Each structure stands twice: as C-alpha cells, then as structure tokens.
Image (cartoon, rainbow, N blue to C red):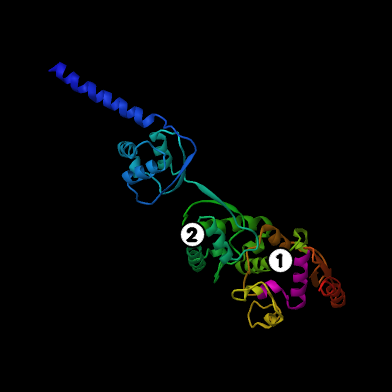
C-alpha cells in the first residue's frame, strides 16, 4: 500500500516540478510585445493574445498561472509593452499590476477644445468625438470654482500629459481641469481664483493674449494694450476673437468677416467676448495678472513674429504703413 502510494506521489511531484519550471523559466526572445487586453477578457483569451504576440510559450501556461494564483480576477484591461524573455509568472504579474503603456501627449498653448480633441485622437489616447462629448458633459457639471459655464473652453490646461490608451475622456478632462487650477493658482491672485466671474474674465483675456502673441516676451505688452483699451471703453478689435466665431475658418480673414454679427466680434462689440477662445498657458495668465505699465493702445505685426506698439492712432497708422502696406 505504501509502495503504491509512493508511485502515485512521485509522478505528481515530478509534474508539479515541471509545471513550476515552465511557469518560472524565462522565455527565449528579444524585443517587446505590444498587446491590448479588452475589458472582461478571460484568462484563456488573454493567454491566446499573449501567445500570438510571442510573450508566452503556450496560452495554456498563462491560463494555468492566472487561475491557480487568482490573478485571473485581477487582470487589468489596457495596452501593455511586455519584454520578450520573461517568464509566464512575470508576465502575469505585469497584467495583474496594471502596468499599462502610458502615452505622452503634449497639448500646446492656444488650442481650442476641438483642436485638443484631435490631439488626443492622434495620440491614441481618446477618440475625438468622445472627448468632445465628455467635455460638454463636464461643462454641465462644472466644479463650483468655475461657476456656471456653457463650455470648458479655455480651462483645459495646455501641458504634457501621460495617459494609457483609451483612457475614459472624462478622466482626461478632469486631469486637465485639475492641472489648470494648480497652474492658474500659481500665477493669479487669490481674489481672482476665488471669484468665478473674475476668473472667467481673466482666462478670456489671457486666451486673446495667447492667440495674439508671436514673440513670447511680448505677452505683458499685448496684455497692456487690451487692459488699456478696456479701461477706456474701446473695442478690443482682436482678429482671433472674430476667427473663433467663423465656422470652418479657411485661414483667410476677410474685411467682410469684421462685420460678422457675433458676441465674439470685438470690432463690433465692446468689452470682453462671452468666454475664452482657446486655452492660455501660464505665461499668458501671468501677463494678464501683471500687464506691463504702458500707454499703448495699438500694435501691428512687424512680419518677423514681433509687433510694433503705439500709444496714438497716428503712430499706429505710421506703423501700419511701414510694416504692412509697404510689404504688399
């Protein structure tokens, strides 16, 4: 009886040892395998995906490891970069830990929400249309510090972010709003940050400064022009605000566009437009909070990225003649 039991135990022990060796021995291979695991995938389905990508030697080995260790219940969906040459146990550990690939995506200053959606789409982080829908939903449930807003335009902070592929757009937007609040609080005084109406006005003006700026060092000067105009009740006469209101703008601003009947047409309407026209960066927010002390009321492009600033209309007309009309 004892001898018969020994004959049974020995093969079982050998089998267990062989299985342990198969699960813990690094697989031969070089490079990385990129795999994408869908939500709700079974251990068997994941094993097949890994096998086809060359990350494990056999799909059954992964299934056994995942089921017997309980990791089958903790596999995270997402995109993974798995070095070939790991053991099945190490691969299972990566999936159970949720070590998904992070995609770096840079959102430049001065983009609209629609343009930001395209950046996210091209980076493979979130589909553009889903991002826009999520932004609209987030505006309806905007946090109290923003007050009631019809759009998040201007509040999705331009920065370099890292997100897994197919991150829920709502999570991306929440991260961008949190980044805005942190960055804005560092450059705007508390009396503006704590007043939703003043904050919206500051972001609106900063978005115009952002779109008007060619040379970064000119931001405080450009801000001073608009602050001076607002103080005198003069229309801002900013081309970017008009462009914002033109559907499918083709890149050519025409004289007839300046007569467009829109609250964003700062040639026809005095004061600030209803809201931001793009997402300003920290430098533009800082310029609005601390504009240069000037008496400038006008500026015109010098065709080299910088502007010529003037305090009087006569000076401005002379600058236009020198830099614009002479160039045609």
- Above or below: residue 161 compared with residue 214: above
Q: Is residue 53 visible?
A: yes
Task: Provide the secondary structure element on which disc 1 rests.
Answer: helix
Callout 1 environment at 10 Å: few (<14), some (14 to 19), or many (20+)? many
Query: Farthest residue toward the top?
Result: 3
Q: Is residue 295 visible?
A: no
- Above or below: residue 61 compared with residue 136: above
Question: Which of marks 1 and 2 precedes in the sequence?
Answer: 2
Q: Is residue 109 left or right of residue 94?
A: right
The kind of secondary structure the magenta stretch mainly shows is: helix
Q: Which residue is mark 1?
A: 209
Q: Position of residue 226 (x, y in %)?
A: 75, 71
Q: Quadrant of the C terminus?
A: bottom right
Q: Which residue is mark 2?
A: 169
- Above or below: residue 12 compared with residue 43: above
Q: Position of residue 80 (x, y in %)?
A: 46, 45
Is residue 269 highlighted in magenta? no
Label annotation for residue 160? none
Q: Quadrant of the N terminus?
A: top left
Q: Is residue 7 left or right of residue 44?
A: left
Q: Which residues are magenta?
A: 221-242
Q: Position of residue 18 (x, y in %)?
A: 31, 26
The residue positioned 47% from the left and 54% from the top of the image is: 167
Near-viewer residue (69 or 148)? 69
Query: Farthest residue toward the left?
Result: 1
């Amino acid at each position: 009886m004892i001898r018969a039991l020994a004959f049974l135990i020995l093969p079982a022990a050998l089998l267990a040892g062989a299985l342990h060796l198969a699960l813990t021995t690094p697989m031969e291979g070089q490079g990385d395998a990129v795999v994408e695991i869908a939500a709700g995938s079974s251990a068997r389905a994941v094993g097949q995906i890994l096998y086809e990508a060359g990350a494990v030697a056999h799909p059954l080995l992964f299934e056994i490891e995942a089921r017997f260790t309980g990791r089958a219940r903790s596999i995270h969906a997402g995109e993974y970069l798995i070095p070939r040459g790991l053991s099945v146990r190490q691969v299972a550990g990566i999936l159970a830990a949720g070590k998904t690939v992070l995609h770096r995506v840079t959102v430049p200053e001065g983009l609209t929400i629609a343009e930001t959606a395209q950046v996210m789409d091209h980076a493979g982080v979130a589909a553009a249309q889903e991002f826009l829908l999520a932004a609209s939903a987030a505006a309806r449930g905007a946090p109290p510090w923003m007050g009631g807003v019809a759009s998040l335009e201007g509040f999705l902070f331009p920065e370099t972010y890292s997100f897994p592929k197919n991150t829920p757009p709502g999570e991306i937007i929440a991260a961008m709003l949190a980044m805005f609040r942190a960055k804005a609080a560092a450059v705007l005084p508390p009396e503006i940050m704590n007043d939703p109406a003043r904050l919206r006005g500051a972001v609106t003006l900063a978005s115009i400064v952002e779109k008007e700026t060619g040379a970064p060092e000119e931001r405080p000067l450009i801000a001073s022009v608009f602050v001076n105009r607002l103080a005198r009740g003069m229309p801002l006469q900013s081309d970017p605000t008009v462009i914002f209101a033109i559907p499918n703008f083709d890149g050519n601003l025409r004289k007839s566009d300046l007569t467009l009947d829109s609250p964003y047409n700062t040639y026809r309407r005095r004061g600030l437009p209803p809201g931001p026209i793009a997402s300003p960066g920290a430098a533009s927010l800082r310029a609005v909070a601390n504009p240069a002390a000037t008496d400038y009321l006008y500026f015109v492009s010098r065709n080299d990225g910088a502007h010529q600033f003037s305090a009087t209309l006569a000076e401005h007309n002379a600058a236009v003649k020198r830099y614009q009309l002479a160039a045609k």
